[in-house]
Image (cartoon, grey):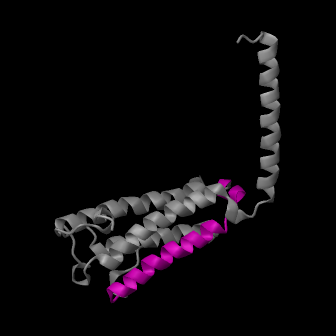
Amino acid sequence: MMCSKNGIRAQVVSLTCALLLCAGSAGAQAAKAPAASSTTAKDLVKSWMEIGGKLTAMAEDFPEDKYDWKPTPEVRSFAEQLLHAASYAAYVGEVAKGLRPKEEDPKRSDFKSKAEVVAYVKKAYADGAKAIEATSEEKLRTSIQVGKWTVTQMGLWDTAVEHSGEHYGQLVVYYRVNKMVPPESRPRK
């Protein structure tokens, strides 16, 4: 079957009009949607909770008697790695709210038990998820000043996800050197 050039043009014009009408309708619906339905925020919360869940699983799983173990004297202990990752997650949440917290790691000596470290890690990622969920698509695109850097809210949250992933990778090494299998690497039941 052969189509004339005019027939093809008419089909292209019809298809283009249909797509524009659909896009306009979808845009109007998106503008009315609440912040929690933001696809970007949903994707971000998913990534945030995934890495937060991995770090929490490690915090709960690693033996308490090895919490202060470190591969070499000049690096952070297992507990200090967790506290560092969670403190940056909490810091980003505060900055995203417009606050200007001091960026520093909590002292290991302020956490007397494994349970206190686990609670701190859980809270940091739970609070972050709530903050992301409360952020509109528009606000995720707004820029903020963080020290000498200007970054979007989305970019700020993304740095925390990436930072947490880097520390997750380091903690995998802590597991392996201790001849343990990290929770994420174990066979699924």
Q: Position of residue 30 (x, y in %)?
A: 76, 54
Q: Position of residue 154 (x, y in %)?
A: 59, 56
Residue appearing at x 52%, y 57% in the figure: 158
Taking the magenta stretch, the answer to whether it contains residue 138 is: yes
Residue sitting nearer the eye, 135 or 81? 135
State whether residue 167 appears in this view.
yes
State whether residue 146 appears in this view.
no
Residue appearing at x 34%, y 79% in the figure: 60
Residue sitting nearer the eye, 97 or 180? 180
Q: Position of residue 143 (x, y in %)?
A: 65, 55
- Say if 83 sits above or below 119 in the image: above
Q: Position of residue 129 (x, y in %)?
A: 56, 70
- Answer with the quarter of the image where residue 62 lies: bottom left
Main SS type for the magenta part? helix
Quadrant placement of the N terminus: top right
Write the start and end of the magenta stretch as one range. 112-141
